[in-house]
Image: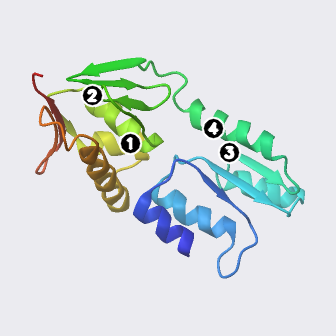
Amino acid sequence: EDALNKFRSSGYDLVMTDVMMPKKDGFELVNEIRKESPRVPVIFITARNRREDMIKGYQKGAMDYITKPLDSELLIYKIKALLGGARRNEHVPELFLFGRWKFETAGRVLHDGKENFRLSPREAELLLALLGEKNSVVKKSVILKKIWGDDSYYNARSMDVYVTRLRGRFRNDPAVVIESVYGTGIKISVGEL
């Protein structure tokens, strides 16, 4: 129940869950998550190694079903593959230059000429979506479907949190403004230096 509430309020790029938990098992948890975010990658990590459980895990939409004991190094590579796989066929520029800023997309690093800031995966995707339409309004529904998988109420609230975080990155630079356009979407405006 706590995990579901946190997922709804914050949004995550990947879900890893055990199957055997009190109150609600992992299969039920993933059912609830799938209703709101059908595309988020899911990995089950569990001691339940029966064939029937594994099949059920994949039927619930798991990308992987890992039985304990697990190899943590292998798990890290599986996570990297899952998180990178969704973007493999999408061409993304390696570098964006805007105002006094540089955004290196591969490392999710934002430079202001003095400091480097490492963005979270969601922050980076949001910034990328806005910079792709710089000085134009991007519809919220388009961003939500592209990054969160759907435009549900909970995902919209999660997106608001990330918009606020991105605004904070540029708070000391009046040349870069991220604004919400009521009833329409979000816009990043980049002025002259």
Amino acid carrying label 4: it is Leu
Tell me: residue 28, above or below residue 109.
Answer: below
Q: In which quarter of the image is the C terminus?
A: top left
Amino acid carrying label 1: it is Glu
* Circles 4, 3 touching at the beta carbon (< 8 Å): yes
Tell me: residue 182, above or below residue 2.
Answer: above
Dot 3 corresponds to which residue?
63
Question: Seen in the image, is 14 located left or right of residue 130?
Answer: right
Can residue 77 be seen here? yes
Q: Where is residue 133 in the image (x, y as percent from the top left)?
A: 23, 26
Dot 1 corresponds to which residue?
123
* Circles 3, 2 touching at the beta carbon (< 8 Å): no
* Of callouts 4 and 3, the N-terminal one: 3
Dot 4 corresponds to which residue?
82
* Of callouts 3 and 2, the N-terminal one: 3
Disc 3 crowd rating (10 Å Cα; few below 14, some 14-19, many 20+) is some
| Nearer to us: label 1 or label 4 | 1
Amino acid carrying label 3: it is Met
